Image (cartoon, grey):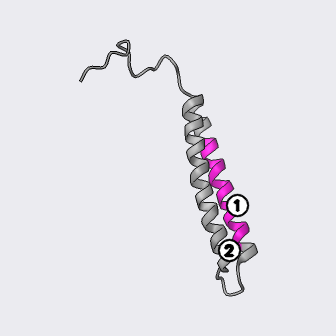
Amino acid sequence: MVERESLIEIVVSVGAVLLMLAAMFAIGSSYGAANSTLSLEGGWMLVWVIVGFILVMTAVGVALAYLLDDSDDSLESDGGDVSA
């Protein structure tokens, strides 16, 4: 059985990918020419969708790391005394 945290990560990630694919399809449908090329404005829209996808996935990763973090899984289990 898949753990709850893993299931949340999978659903959120797949949802973000589907959102990006839908945006790319909408741009291709709106700014595509008859000979299967993309106009200059459509190209820029596609670039911004990719940049937005990167930013959204970064924010999702940080949010999931923060929300799904167990406070008892601290990396410094020796009381915070770090010696090199």
- The overriding secondary structure of the stretch rendered in magenta is helix
- Badge 2: residue crowd in 10 Å (few <14, some 14–19, many ≥20): some
- In magenta segment, residue 13: yes
Magenta region, residue range: 10-28
User: For the residue marked with disc 1, what is the amino acid?
Assistant: Ala
Residue beneath the point at 38% across and 19% down: 76
Judging depth in this view, the residue of 42 and 22 nearest the camera is 42
**Where does residue 78 sit, x and y in percent of width and height?**
35, 13
**Which residue position is annotated with label 1?**
22
Q: Which mark is residue 42?
A: 2
Which callout, 2 or 1, points to the residue nearer the camera? 2
Quadrant (top left/top right/bottom left/bottom right) for the C terminus: top left
Q: CA distance from mark 2 to mark 1?
A: 14 Å
Q: Is residue 7 above or below residue 38?
A: above
Total count of labels: 2
**Where does residue 26 sit, x and y in percent of width and height?**
73, 67
**Where does residue 53 sit, x and y in percent of width and height?**
61, 55
Residue sitting farthest toward the bottom: 35
Residue beneath the point at 67% across and 80% down: 39
User: For the residue marked with disc 2, what is the amino acid?
Assistant: Gly
Quadrant (top left/top right/bottom left/bottom right) for the N terminus: top right
Q: Secondary structure at mark 1?
A: helix
Q: Is residue 30 visible?
A: yes
